[in-house]
Amino acid sequence: MRMQSLPLQVLGAVGSGAFGALFLFTGIGKATDISRFASDIAAYRLLPLDAAFPAAYGIIAVETALGVWLFSGFAAFLAGVISALLLLVFATAMGINVWRGRTHLACGCIPGIDARLSWNSVFRNVALALLVFLVGLCGQPGSFFLCVEGLLVGVTMLLLSVATVSLLKREARI
């Protein structure tokens, strides 16, 4: 496999850091309130009711593992493909419910952010799937220090995004 240019590798490292943080944050966040997350899954009415808790545990395990995998930079392309597929599964589940007119449901995406289903949430997941796939194509830098810097920048970007969304929602309520 040919080596990617340094700018693409740095973009890959930053993207892996951001998406790794996203998946790790959501996986751990959902694990802290498994009952609520299982309830969100059951509300989608795509699985039998008895499957809500096993599905919740499975999704939490997969998201957490993907977060660690993306952080590691190992097999970046495969990590990007699997992450993109998971996001497309989520987009499909959301899209089915939006198409059914069930937009009152909680997205269940990021713990602590009370987002409802909409076509915007579907398209956001599709866009994120495309981005994480592209991150996998970028590869990782050969330098350990650039990998760490990319990871820290990615984590910082995610934390700033979550903080911005939280602050904007608070302002809207005031």
Image (cartoon, rainbow, N blue to C red):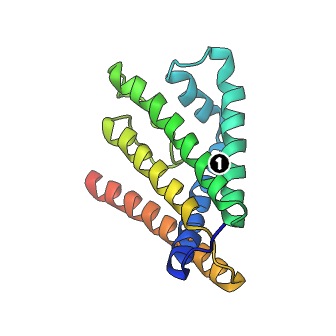
Residue type beneath disc 1: Gly
In the image, 98 versus 30, the foreground residue is 98
Numbered marks: total: 1
Relative side of 84 to 165, left or right: right
Q: Position of residue 127 (x, y in %)?
A: 40, 50
Residue pictured at 56% horizontal, 22% vertical:
42
Dot 1, how many residues are within 10 Å of its Cα: few (below 14), some (14-19), or many (20+)? many
Res. 23 in view: yes
Q: Position of residue 105 (x, y in %)?
A: 42, 29
Tell me if residue 122 comes above or below residue 149 in the rendering: above
Residue pictured at 66% horizontal, 33% vertical:
56
Q: Position of residue 94 (x, y in %)?
A: 43, 31
Quarter of the rendering containing residue 71 = bottom right
Q: Which residue is mark 1?
A: 27
Q: Quadrant of the N terminus?
A: bottom right
Tell me if residue 1 comes above or below residue 103 in the rendering: below
Residue pictured at 56% horizontal, 41% vertical:
85
In the image, 131 versus 155, the foreground residue is 131
Res. 24 in view: no
In the image, 75 versus 36, the foreground residue is 75
Q: Quadrant of the C terminus?
A: bottom left
Tell me if residue 136 comes above or below residue 151 in the rendering: above
